[in-house]
Amino acid sequence: MSEVLIEDRGHVRWIILNRPEAMNAITGQMLGELNEAFKAADDDPDVRVVVLSGAGRAFCAGLDLKQASAGEGIGGAGLATAGARHYSTREICTVTLQRMDTPVIAVINGAAAGYGLDLALGCDMRLMSDAAVLMPGFARMGVVPESGGTWYLPRLLGWAKACEVSMLGDPLSARASEDYGLVNKAVPASELESVAAAWAEKIAANAPLAITEMKRLFRHGQTQDFESHSHHVLMSVLNLFKSEDFREGVQSFVEKRPPEFRGR
């Protein structure tokens, strides 16, 4: 059975981790399927937004501790086979996620621990159920945030807060996660899917070329000085001025009607 489910809702692609009986703990199969799902979504011009969530009561519990304790899976003897491919740069799905130009919203419906937390941090936006919890317990397991957390946490929180979250390892409620700035919004569990759908559909209705270029510029801006970045932005804007989407945006504003963007 597939460990990653895919559902298209208009221009929004929902990618669902699908091991509910194991709280969506990761396996080699799941990582491979997720990596391919990310790449396929980013390559599909009809997909304007990706929503990532988990089946059942968890987002992703990270490493499958039952497998690891039995010497199996990614954390056990299987590291040499099931997990090794994941740790080549080409196959790390959190690297693929970071490279994506399509915006990705994490919908944290339940516990996000270990790899699951890193996966959520790699998304562009995070909506979190008020019944969910973030579990940065890496130090308690004798490991580090191995799939993006050491890069994202200082950028999201600043150095001192990143150390506090990762080194203390205390679970974080939805409210605390929102207060820290780790998630965009804490949402009542009963409303999580509808709020996520509304956010995704609103983004998908905006000009896709502009959204893609925004994400690229945000990413490049993290490693550029201001002057270099300003030149980069100018070139992007000049290209967007030539697009059909820009003309549609201007025309719809003048005609006082909703725009119909085609990504051209």
Image: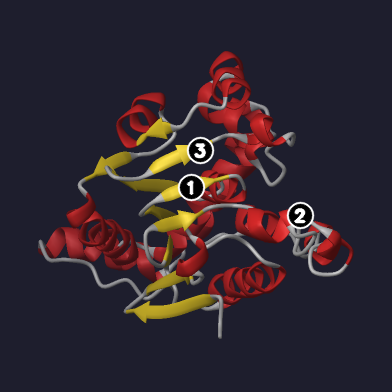
Point 41% across, 25% down: residue: 180
Per the model, the C-alpha gap separating discs 3 and 1 is 6 Å
Residue located 41% across and 71% down the image: 14
Q: What residue is at 40 percent from the left and 41 percent from the top?
A: 133
The residue carrying mark 2 is: 75
Q: At label 1, which amino acid type do we have? A: Ala
* Relative image position of residue 261 (x, y in whole percent): 32, 71
**Front-most of residues 10 and 191:** 191
Mark 1 and mark 2: span between their CA atoms?
18 Å
Amino acid type at circle 2 is Gly
Disc 3 target residue: 135
Q: Position of residue 200 (x, y in %)?
A: 32, 61
The outermost residue toward the bottom is 1
* Horizontal relation, residue 211 to residue 151: left or right: left
Q: Residues within 10 Å of mark 3 (few under 14, many from 20)?
A: many
Q: Quadrant of residue 56?
A: bottom left
* Image quadrant in which you'd find residue 81: bottom right
Left or right of 231 in this view: 44: left
- Front position in the image: 159 or 219: 159
In the image, taking residue 156 as reference, residue 258 lies left or right, namely left
Q: Amino acid at mark 3?
A: Met
As drawn, the label of residue 112 is 1
